[in-house]
Amino acid sequence: MAEQQIGYVEWEAWGLELVMERGTLRKLLFVDKGRAAEAPEPEMAVARLQLLAYLRGSAKGFTLELEPKGTRFQQDVWKALREIPYGETLSYKQLAESIGRPMACRAVGQAAHRNPLPILIPCHRLVGADGSLTGYAGGIELKRRLLDLERQNQEQK
C-alpha cells in the first residue's frame, strides 16, 4: 500500500479529489474537473466507488474509515455532523446544542468550515437558523445540489 494515494471523482460540474494515507481517508478537496486518475489501489477504488454511489443516489452513507485531524471541539462537531440523518438539515445552533455547547454557534460554523472531508462528513447539512443555505467550501450551488440529491432520494424509500 502506498504511503499516500490520490483519487479523483467527477460529478456534474464538480471535481473531487480524495486523499488517503495508509488506507484511511484524510481529505476531500474540491478541484477542477478533468484531472486524470491513475488506476487506484484497492482502498482508493472502494472510496471512489462509495462516493460515486452516493453522488448517483444509490447509497445514503459511507462505510469508509475516516480519520480527520482536528481539535477536540472540531472532532465533536464532525462526529455530530455524521449523525445528521440523510436528507435532513440542522441549524448551527441546533448542532451546537446537540454537543452541549449552546452558545458556540459560530465555533460550530468554523469547525464545519475546517472539515477536511466534506460530503463524507456532511457539513452541507448545516443551514442558517431560518433554513437558508450558508457558506460551503464547494460553493452554495454544490451545497444546494447535494441537499436536493438527498431529498429526492429520501423520498424514494
Image (cartoon, rainbow, N blue to C red):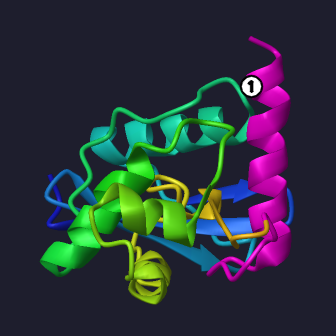
Q: Amino acid at mark 1?
A: Gln
Is 34 above or below relative to 99? below
Q: Residue at x 34, y 62 (%)?
A: 78
Residue 155 place in picture, x, y as percent: 82, 21
Q: Residues within 10 Å of mark 1 (few under 14, many from 20)?
A: some
Which corner quadrant of the image does residue 79 belong to? bottom left
Which corner quadrant of the image does residue 134 belong to? bottom right
Q: How many marks?
A: 1
User: Which region is colored magenta?
Assistant: 131-157
Q: Nearer the viewer, residue 60 or 30?
A: 60
Q: Is residue 7 visible?
A: no
Residue 71 place in picture, x, y as percent: 17, 81
Residue 139 place in picture, x, y as percent: 75, 80
Q: Residue at x 42, y 78 (%)?
A: 108
Q: Residue at x 20, y 60 (%)?
A: 67
Name the element at disc 1.
helix
Relative to residue 27, is residue 8 drawn left or right?
right
Residue 123 place in picture, x, y as percent: 54, 64
* Magenta span includes 78: no
The residue at which mark 1 appears reads as 154
Is 60 above or below relative to 119? above
Q: Nearer the viewer, residue 21 or 110?
A: 110
Q: Residue at x 50, y 44 (%)?
A: 84
Which corner quadrant of the image does residue 127 belong to? bottom right
